[in-house]
Amino acid sequence: MAIRLNSAYLDGFVSEADFEAMAPAMREVCAKLANGTGAGNDYIGWRDLPVDYDKEEFARIKAAARRIRETSDVLVVIGIGGSYLGARAVIEMLGSQFFNEFSPLKVYFAGNNISGDYLNHILKLCEGKRLSVNVVSKSGTTTEPALAFRVFKKLLEDRYGKEEAAKRIYATTDRARGTLKSLADAAGYETFVIPDDVGGRYSVLTAVGLLPIAAAGFDIDKLMLGAQTARSQFSNDLPDNPVNRYAMARNILYNQGKRVETLSCFEPAFTLFAEWWKELYGESEGKDKKGLMPTSVIFSTDLHSMGQYIQDGSRVLFETFVAFQNPASDFTVAEEPGDFDGLNYLGGRTMSFVNKNAQSGTILAHVEGGVPCMVVEADRIDEQNIGELIYFFERSCAVSGYLLGINPFNQPGVESYKRNMFALLGKPGFEKEREQLIQKIK
């Protein structure tokens, strides 16, 4: 069954008349997506990706994943932003945050920061282990992953020699150009393609995400099947389409003065998926001095910290819950002689029963506290449902961004810090900027 949206908890905050008033604009937006006439239309390849993907490359991805599992104890995935977040989100959703404790192949992520301490920890984890690397970069020159790849390339070549190292390096990059593509061709790395018409934050269903996910042992056929189901269900302009209704609700609440959306979930394994969601919406909508600030919490843990603010703080936010109806596994609470902790009333109940009631109680409390809430419902945590959820959020982000009146597929703001960083680091060509910036540093 496809992803569902429960918007009943918006009653009192958003009316059906509000939805009806926004429906014409929503239909125009859906027509732009369908016809490819909206801003950023050269980056809408994700739209039909679940059915229109390279089947030959897909087979190579699965073959490479098998080879990595057969020849390696550790896979280091090097990338930043959309080049790693989607893969890590899916792996931790399906395998839990303890994935590396149980999996014969450990998957570590590097190149997503500039911390030498973090890098040293991963290098230590690789000592004495059979190692493969998947470097993910459109250009090959983005600072964070380029630094990490320089380190791991040398490590592999020193350990195995250049010829064997080349067999252990997999490059996911541009189809025909760029520093990494040129290096891969010269060195003989197996390469996979980042499609020209798919931006990084929308790339989890390309080789960018699929190779690490498959190497981790998960079924990417089922992942794509879930995305296909979502595409079939949600690619229309109907007002009751969950994607469209979610996008309209976000914009209605934004127009009412809400400035923050908090994504909430009662499953710890959702933590990195929420990070992927924050990149998707933050990078897509945060421009032209517009957009909701995407934040996330994991309950019930954060009910004992951020729960106070959500319940009683400034009423600038609304909340979107992601709820899984059936747990991947469960645990039954036993009765304790003497009932020393007063919990025998839960004897014979499952943890999922307790969790669901904690969720229901939280939603009711937050709504009563003045926080509009919606619930995105999925059946369970598995490949097919996660594929559906990915496509649900990708399409709703595009619809929502167009309703907001911005281009949801570019990211002009991320270049500002890069220029400053390059100048301060002394990169050739930035000498003038360097002198100016040094004067500003207190």
Image (cartoon, helix red, strand yellow):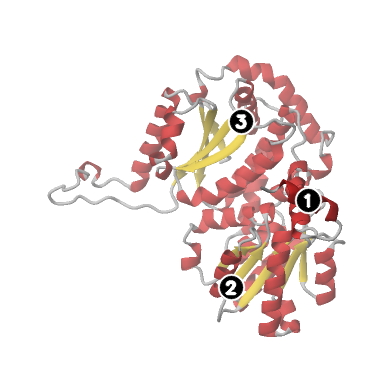
Visible in this render: residue 250? yes
Circle 2 Cα neighbour tier, 10 Å, few/some/many (<14 / 14–19 / ≥20):
some
Q: Amino acid at mark 1?
A: Arg
User: Which one is closest to the eye, mark 1 or mark 2?
Assistant: 1
Q: Is residue 429 left or right of residue 216?
A: right
User: Contact (CB < 8 A) between labels 1 and 2?
Assistant: no
* Tag 2 secondary structure: helix
Element type at mark 1: helix
Identify the residue shown where x is 66% and y is 59%.
Answer: 210
Q: Which residue is mark 3?
A: 246
Q: Quadrant of the N terminus?
A: top right
Amino acid beneath label 2:
Leu
Depth check, front residue: 220 or 298 = 298
Residue sitting at 61 percent across and 26 percent down?
A: 249
Report which residue position mark 2 lands on. 123
Front label number (2 vs 3): 2
Instruction: Compare marks 1 and 3 and give the one earlier in the sequence.
Output: 3
Cα separation between marks 1 and 2: 29 Å
